[in-house]
Amino acid sequence: MISLMLAGGVALWVAVLSTPVLIRWLARNRIGQHVREDGPEMHLAKAGTPTMGGVTILVALVVGYAAAHLAHVPFRRSGLLVVAATLAYGLIGFLDDSIKVRHRRSLGLNKRAKLASQVSVGIAFAVAAERWAHVDTHLSFTRWSSTGIDLGPVGWGILAVLILVGTSNAVNLTDGLDGLASGSATFCFAVLGVIGYWQFRHPSIYRVAPALDLALVAVALAGACLGFLWWNAAPARIFMGDTGALALGSGMGALCLMMDLQLLLVIIGGLFVVVTLSVVVQVVSFRLFGRRVFRMAPLHHHFELKGWPETTVIVRFWILAGLFAAFGLGIFYADFLTTPGQGIH
């Protein structure tokens, strides 16, 4: 328990204290956000706001995760692999943000280069997870035996790549309003931290041997997001950029893969799923029928254009994110209670 408090507490304070330092450096070097010209008009005032704040989230994650091991908890391969994947996707986002800043536009890496980078890191993660971390290859909902379907190394690897690419882009799509992505991600990582600790306390039920180390990563990410949110909340003093969005999404996906929660991820990160589906529906509808379902996609911009104040959209989406995450935790615990000898008789 001490290690969990260290991971979350240290990560939170590192993010809170380092973010204003980064804000001043970015402002001094005129490194600011470039806003989409076709976006809501009220966002034009945000142009020039310091971006790439995801750097402090990544620093806070590493420091918080490392500090937790001062409580004599050994580093485990699965935890290190999740941290490495998060940093790698953060690096892709950093390159994307750097190109935007250098060329003073809202577009960074071209789509093919960005996707190829994400897929490459996903493949490397999948191979390392199977050969180095010895992950279970069963398709899982709440534990390795929840479906009874063994995907095998190749099938699990393909699923891992799809999840990492999907979650990283889902969080990136959601990162369109002040504090929306960081606040929503905090709920998800907090729940994953609870689940990881529960798996650690019940090793006879869950085959997640390094569960405590994975819980430390989740709690460190929750603390980092919460600390960054102090400066990212509306009106934002800094944006996380693709550096933070891709990192948080991949961290979420990697944790669920290593914790045997691949299918439960869809519920825990339900808000990100809904936002992504809104984009898919909009694109498909426009290309097939020439009509838009929403005034603008992603979904949060639709409500802005309907007249909702930005803070109202953010808070209501936070509520939805919290409900999705809590529902996922409830499903996990309900499954635990159905285990023979664990329920209340």
Image (tube, rainbow, N blue to C red):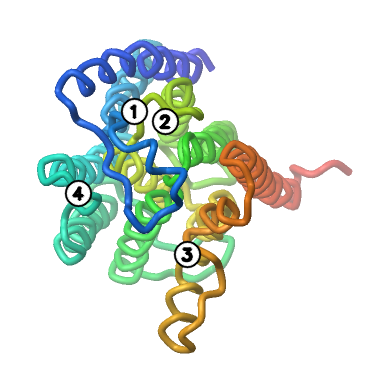
- Residue where numbered disc 4 is placed: 105
Relative to 202, 62 lies left or right: left
Upstream in the sequence, badge 4 or badge 2?
Answer: 4
Secondary structure, mark 1, is: helix
Judged by depth in the image, the label closer to the viewer, 1 or 4, is: 4
Amino acid on which the number 2 mark rests in the picture: Leu
Amino acid on which the number 1 mark rests in the picture: Ile
How crowded pointer 1 is (Cα within 10 Å; few <14, some 14-19, many 20+) is rated as many
Rounded to the nearest angstrom, the CA distance separating label 1 from label 4 is 24 Å
Q: Are the two marked residues, 1 and 4, in contact with CB atoms closer than 8 angstroms? A: no
Relative to 168, 268 lies left or right: right
- Residue where numbered disc 2 is placed: 221
Upstream in the sequence, badge 1 or badge 4?
Answer: 1
Quadrant into which the N terminus falls: top right
Residue 112 percent across, percent down from the top left: 17, 66
Q: Which of 16 and 201 lies nearest the eye of the viewer?
A: 16
Rounded to the nearest angstrom, the CA distance separating label 4 from label 3 is 41 Å
Q: Are the two marked residues, 4 and 2, in contact with CB atoms closer than 8 angstroms? A: no
Q: Image point 27% across, 56% down: which residue?
A: 126
Amino acid on which the number 4 mark rests in the picture: Arg
Rounded to the nearest angstrom, the CA distance separating label 3 from label 2 is 25 Å
Secondary structure, mark 4, is: loop
